[in-house]
């Protein structure tokens, strides 16, 4: 049986665990400092922690559970990592250079069951949730890349927008957020963290009640039920009016802004009437809902969808602005590598299957 990742413990959980095994409370602070400030990769490097405690940690936990399988670097500074988990599964993590800092986009599940018809992440169905430790380690791997480059840079922002539906892995998501926000460790501010969901109303309410102070983004992608169901099958279970009730709950309880993410698909959801419908959907909430328009990264397996042309994107943007909607067009990253979320993983898995098939043909020779 694989040992648990120590990154999966919050500071409070680590403290309680060490006390349970007979160690003083201050040991947790020492261990936490070694993990997140000094970023050691072996318990034996924790030189001011007594040997008994070091051995105890090594007997029960591991620090490293991800290994770098592929790394792609874009000319714009974006780096996409394909990590192999202990069970052999592959996940993607992206490090992006923004004007405001260094952002990491993390994955929360192996595969995805949401099944959005345009998305590379859903090409391979979910096989399991990631543990909180595996999600935290994605941040650590990105930070270690920066450390090794001797650039004296730190991860400043986190977006939970990678493979999987974060709210479908809620317990591990919350644990992950508590770890990375901890001021004694990575100290990534709540306002610099965004969680994106396809729209699970019950979990939006639970997220609201948890009062984590992090930002919320919702993948809307269509302004009406007919169109949204066509491109996002989750809308069959949770139609827009049910989703908007959860949005109202979040806004009334937190008074925090929500971002609606809207991928523009050529001649599908990018017409002026769609922009007007979207403006009407958020009418009365324009001060607390902003729209992020996302140019589509085409995926070979979803050839029915194409990127909206620049004229359509600008027209959609202008229509929303004229209706008083706060909106932006997402700045693209990694356009010269496998830009779409899940694309690198899907390509690698397809290549592995082809290699196995070639080996079988050779063996049958």
Image (cartoon, rainbow, N blue to C red):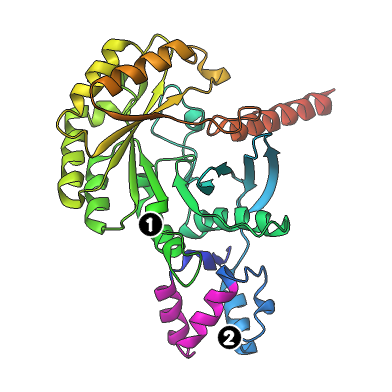
User: Badge 2 local density, few (<14 within 10 Å), some, or many (20+)?
Assistant: some
Tell me: residue 109, above or below residue 307: below
| Residue 305 visible, this angle | no
Image spot of residue 311 (x, y percent)? 44, 11
User: Is 89 on the left-hand or right-hand side of 191?
Assistant: right
User: Is 204 on the left-hand or right-hand side of 46?
Assistant: left
Residue 96 placement: quadrant? top right
Q: Earlier in the sequence, mark 2 or mark 1?
A: 2
Quadrant where the N terminus sits is bottom right
Along the viewing direction, whichever of 55 and 176 lies nearer the viewer = 176
Where does label 1 land, which residue?
Answer: 190
User: Badge 1 local density, few (<14 within 10 Å), some, or many (20+)?
Assistant: some
Tell me: residue 329, above or below residue 192: above
Magenta span dominant secondary structure: helix
Image spot of residue 143 (x, y percent)? 61, 57
In whole angstroms, how far apart are the C-alphas of marks 2 and 1? Answer: 32 Å
Along the viewing direction, whichever of 319 and 340 lies nearer the viewer = 319
Residue range (magenta): 11-34
Quadrant where the C terminus sits is top right
Image spot of residue 318 (x, y percent)? 34, 18
Residue at the spot 41% in from the left edge and 12% down from the top edge = 312
Disc number placed over residue 53 in the picture, else none? 2
Residue 19 placement: quadrant? bottom left
Task: Say which element carries label 1.
Answer: helix
Residue at the spot 65% in from the left edge and 58% down from the top edge = 144
Residue 155 lies in magenta, yes or no? no
Task: Say which element carries label 2.
Answer: helix
Mark 2 or 1: in front is: 1
Residue at the spot 66% in from the left edge and 33% down from the top edge = 348
């Amino acid at each position: 049986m694989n040992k648990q990742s120590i990154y999966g413990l919050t500071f409070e959980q680590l403290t309680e665990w060490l006390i349970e095994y007979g160690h003083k409370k201050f040991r947790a602070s020492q261990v936490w400092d070694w993990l997140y400030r000094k970023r050691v990769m072996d318990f034996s490097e924790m030189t001011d922690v007594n040997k008994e405690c070091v051995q105890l940690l090594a007997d029960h936990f591991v620090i490293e559970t991800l290994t770098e399988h592929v790394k792609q670097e874009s000319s714009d500074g974006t780096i996409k990592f394909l990590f192999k988990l202990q069970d052999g599964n592959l996940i993607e993590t992206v490090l992006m250079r923004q004007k405001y800092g260094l952002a990491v986009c993390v994955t929360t599940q192996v595969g995805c069951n949401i099944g959005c018809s345009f998305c590379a992440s859903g090409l391979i169905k979910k096989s399991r949730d990631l543990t909180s430790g595996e999600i935290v380690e994605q941040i650590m791997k990105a930070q270690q890349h920066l450390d090794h480059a001797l650039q004296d840079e730190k991860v400043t922002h986190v977006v939970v927008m990678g493979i999987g539906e974060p709210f479908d892995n809620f317990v591990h998501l919350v644990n992950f957020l508590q770890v990375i926000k901890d001021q004694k460790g990575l100290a990534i501010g709540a306002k610099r963290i965004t969680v994106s969901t396809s729209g699970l109303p019950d979990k939006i309410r639970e997220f609201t009640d948890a009062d984590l102070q992090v930002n919320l983004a919702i993948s809307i992608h269509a302004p009406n039920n007919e169109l949204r169901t066509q491109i996002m099958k989750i809308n069959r279970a949770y139609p827009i009016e049910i989703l908007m009730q959860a949005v109202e709950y979040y806004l009334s309880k937190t008074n925090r802004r929500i971002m609606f993410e809207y991928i523009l698909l050529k001649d599908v959801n990018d017409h002026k009437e769609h922009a007007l419908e979207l403006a009407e959907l958020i009418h009365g909430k324009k001060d607390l809902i902003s729209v992020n328009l996302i140019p589509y990264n085409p995926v070979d397996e979803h050839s029915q969808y194409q990127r909206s042309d620049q004229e359509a994107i600008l027209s959609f943007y202008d229509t929303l602005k004229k209706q008083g909607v706060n909106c932006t067009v997402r700045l693209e990253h990694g356009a010269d590598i496998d830009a779409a979320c899940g694309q690198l993983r899907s390509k690698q898995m397809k290549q592995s299957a082809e290699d196995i098939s070639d080996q079988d043909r050779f063996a049958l020779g």
